[in-house]
Image (cartoon, rainbow, N blue to C red):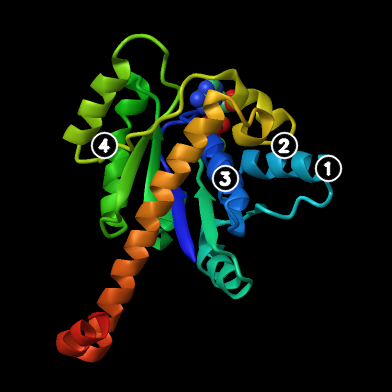
Amino acid sequence: MYTIALLIQKGGSGKTTLAISLATTAAADGLTALIVDLDPQTSACNWHDRRVAANPGAQNPLCLSAQPSRLAAVLREAGEGGIDLVIIDTPAKSSDAALAAAKVADLVLVPCKPQTFDLETVKSTREIIALAGGKPALAILNDVGAVGNRHEQAKAFLQNEGLPVCPYSFGHRVCFGDAVFFGKSATEHDPRGKGAEECRNVYKYTIRIVRKLEQERKRNNGIAKNGPRQARVKAG
Ligand SMILES: Nc1ncnc2c1ncn2[C@@H]1O[C@H](COP(=O)(O)OP(=O)(O)OP(=O)(O)O)[C@@H](O)[C@H]1O
Ligand SMILES: [Mg+2]
């Protein structure tokens, strides 16, 4: 099971939009996905309610609301229940929830608009990631305008802050907002649209990273268990 936490200390950066996009694209890719909504605003759960009301058979992705203190238990149950991918959506301005999510994550994604108000919160978001043990993290630029080079400036800023940036981003597109009204994601609402293509690209890129991280973890566990020599022989 892979666990991805979405966090940034700025509201409205696209955490829930990214959570929904990744979870539905993972489901379309054959994974069983679960969104864990740590936000008392429960936007992801509200989206899921609309989704199930429109299609009572919609079982993947699943979505549930949880408190940060219940996260470990939720993940244990998710693992036992055959979930392949857990996506943790967090509230803005809650370092408790963000820290709890970062601690259990294999990968932290930081959705960020190429705007000053978003970028200036990246430092405190990085501090939370460091407190969680310096988890692998990746910024995803969201709501990128069709003109201008603000996203290039934002990318340079983020890299300078020590945060790698996903080569794929989400443009400013109405499909992201329109889709959630129907309990859908952009990939489902307008499968041939640019927003859908962006979702698939971001998904493919991030899932490749978590798979690589898992391979590394397994290799390191092998080394810890068997010692370096046996682990090398096994790998060879
Ligand atoms: N790429 C985009 N293009 C257009 N609108 C977008 C895009 N991404 C997000 N939005 C819209 O911006 C608003 C905020 O997005 P979202 O709720 O995903 O942010 P959030 O970080 O989860 O916010 P909060 O901190 O309040 O939980 C929503 O109305 C959403 O539909
Ligand atoms: Mg949200």
Residue at x-position 32% and y-position 43%:
138
Percent x, y of residue 215: 33, 68
Task: Name the mark on residue 25.
Answer: 3
* Real-space CA distance between mark 3 and mark 4, rounded to the nearest whole angstrom: 30 Å
**Mark 1, secondary structure of its residue:** helix
Whichever of labels 3 and 2 marks the residue nearer the N terminus, that label is 3
Instruction: Name the side, left or right, on which 37 lies relative to 136.
Output: right
Per the model, the C-alpha gap separating discs 1 and 4 is 40 Å
Which label belongs to residue 123?
Answer: 4
Residue neighbourhood size for the residue with mark 2, other residues' Cα within 10 Å, grouped as few (<14), some (14–19), many (≥20)? many
Give neighbour class at mark 4: few <14, some 14-19, many 20+ (Cα, 10 Å).
some
Alpha carbon separation for disc pair 2 and 1 = 9 Å
The type of residue carrying mark 2 is Gly
Residue displayed at 21% across by 35% down = 159
Characterize the local packing of mark 3: few (<14), some (14-19) or many (20 or more) Cα atoms within 10 angstroms. many
Q: Secondary structure at mark 3?
A: helix
Q: Nearer the viewer, mark 3 or mark 4?
A: 3
Residue at the spot of label 2: 183
Q: Nearer the viewer, mark 1 or mark 4?
A: 1
Quarter holding the C terminus is: bottom left
The answer to which of 12 and 227 lies nearer the viewer is 227
User: What type is the residue that disc 3 sits on?
Assistant: Thr
Which picture quadrant has residue 17? top right
